[in-house]
Amino acid sequence: MTLIARTRARAVETLTLDSPHNRNALSAALVGDLADALTAAGKDPGVRAIVLTHTGNTFSAGADLKDPPHPEALVALLRQIVELSKPVVARVTGHVRAGGLGLLAACDIAAASTDATFAFTEVRIGVAPAVISLPLLPRTVPRALARHYLTGERFDAPEAVATGLLTTCDSDVDTALDPILDGLRRSAPDALAETKRLLTARVLEAFDRDADALTALSARLFSSPQAREGMTAFLERRDPAWVV
């Protein structure tokens, strides 16, 4: 049974993260299913663009602590979104945490409702936003991102637009997306592919340069004593030992 629902309307394929039992956390299974769905949509000549959205009130809660994907699999998924020849548009109507923010950054365009919330919670469980930095750092404002990386604070959709994490937000996300999807439908497929290639060149340079080092960093941190304490505290709904 796949964790990705697929629908299509007027050449736009919608891929819906559909794992409500864990708030669409990035499990090994979900990462694999999403990669397969993206591959199929990328090869389909009837697809002009892809919308990535979600069921429930959470786009993604980040890595599934009970069934985490291997860091290399997450790197491959993020790179696949960036490299796909067709534009990928994120549609968010709920909360996004940790690794889920990497999905947003990998997408070419990201729109959210104004009641969506965001947080880089990695530091609060003893790890770092390592792998997701590959698409995030080239596309966001460094000074603004520093605060959110270092504190794990929750922030709102207008702030996410200001940092470069989102393209736009609106009280009705579909109102924001209508002109964007109309524009993509009016654009020539080959021209879209080449234009996306221009826009993603700098992001792909980060993957080529830093992917191995950040994959190793992620694996090291997730196996550290602080991470074990942080994840245990999270699952037990208590503060980790280092909180003062």
Image (tube, helix red, strand yellow):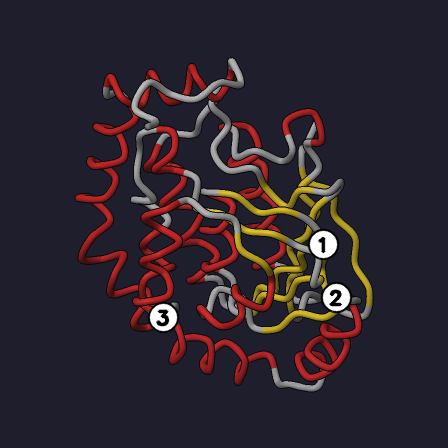
**Label at residue 141:** 3
Please report whichever mark, 2 or 3, sits nearer to the chain's N-terminal start.
3
**Badge 2 element:** helix
Q: Position of residue 232 (x, y in %)?
A: 42, 15
**Badge 3 element:** loop
Compute the Cα span from label 2 to label 1: 7 Å
Compute the Cα span from label 2 to label 3: 23 Å
Q: Is residue 6 depicted above or below 166 in this figure?
A: above
**Label at residue 104:** none
Q: Position of residue 103 (x, y in %)?
A: 50, 52
In the rendered structure, are the residues bearing label 2 and label 1 in contact, judged by CB atoms less than 8 Å apart?
yes
Q: Is residue 89 depicted above or below 227 in this figure?
A: below
Mark 1, residue position: 93
User: Is 68 displayed left or right of 210 in the figure?
Assistant: right
**Front one among 160 and 209:** 160
Q: Is residue 190 depicted above or below 77 in this figure?
A: below
Mark 2, residue position: 173
- Sort mark 1 into few (<14), some (14-19) or many (20+) by Cα contacts within 10 Å: many
User: Is 180 displayed left or right of 175 in the figure?
Assistant: left
* Front: mark 2 or 3: 3
Residue at the extreme front of the image, as rendered: 244
**Badge 1 element:** loop
Amino acid residing under circle 2: Val
Q: Is residue 180 depicted above or below 166 in this figure?
A: below
Please report whichever mark, 2 or 1, sits nearer to the chain's N-terminal start.
1
